[in-house]
Image: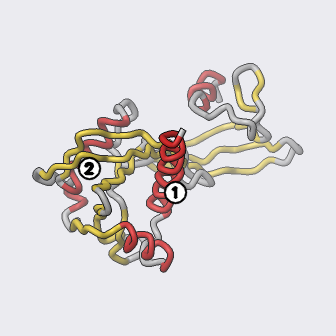
Amino acid sequence: MDLSLVQERTSQFPKSGYCTWENGLPNMSIRTLSSREVYRNPWLSLREDRIERSNGAEGIYSVVDKDDCAIILPVEGDTIYLIEQFRYTIQQRALELPQGGWESPDVDPEELARGELREETGLVAASMTYLGTMSIAYGFANQKQYVYLASGLTHAETDPDPEEHDLTLHTFTIAEFEQMLLDGAIQDVCTLGAWGLYKIWKEKERHSQLG
């Protein structure tokens, strides 16, 4: 694989204490020997890489390449907005935070978050606060998800994609929402992760205001 391509794919990795770096690249214990595309549709592609581990063992690794997406927390006082839709993979209707992507690699994250919020809920936010970025299922996919808090909400018309024909909007109190997370009524890992980021951010904001 071309070194420049590896650099492009890893340029946005956080340079934290959990990863060592050499010459601007993460010190990887697995290297790519070759790569081939197995499948592609308008939403994602699947590739199979031939790899070599640092112990010399060779193998394969399947990777789903999918453009980044956004998840939005529409919170208004003690109320949170959730959407419900049928999730084909689990053959169930599910409650979750509004989220999605535009199948475009160059979209502005806040623009994407505002667009997804409007499309799925009909809500328009006066302000969007960036809370962080999560990796979705990085055991097999390289998709990132940007997390935004939406506040100053007003209602407009929804504009769902054709694949989102069955979306319904619900409101819950924060206490009801958190109880559903604990009870397993909401199992979407992105919703769980986004709420965790929000809780940490809110606590830090509270401490900063206290001085």
**Which amino acid is tagged 1?**
Gly
At mark 2, the secondary structure is helix
Q: How many marks?
A: 2
* Nearest to the observer: residue 168 or residue 28: 168
Q: Is residue 51 left or right of residue 45?
A: right
Badge nearest the viewer, 1 or 2: 1
Residue placed under numbered mark 2 in the picture? 117
Marks 1/2: CA distance? 19 Å
Q: In x, y percent, where is residue 60?
A: 70, 50
* Above-or-below relation of 44 to 34: below
Q: Residue 110: x, y in percent?
A: 34, 36
Alpha-carbon neighbours of circle 2 within 10 Å: few (<14), some, or many (≥20)?
Answer: many
Figure check: 143 above or below 121: above
**Which residue is rendered at x = 89% and y = 45% of the image?**
55
Could you tell me if the residues under marks 1 and 2 are in contact, i.e. CB atoms within 8 Å?
Answer: no
Q: Residue at x 57, y 42 (%)?
A: 36
Q: Residue at x 42, y 78 (%)?
A: 185
Between 171 and 1, which is closer to the camera in this rendering? 171
Instruction: Write down the quadrant of residue 50 in the picture.
Output: top right
Closest to the observer: 153 or 110?
153
Give the residue pinned by disc 1. 196
Q: Is tag 1's residue or tag 2's residue first in the polypeptide sequence?
A: 2
Q: Amino acid at mark 2?
A: Leu
Position of residue 135 in the picture relative to residue 92 (left or right): right
The answer to whether 22 is drawn above or below residue 144 in the figure is above
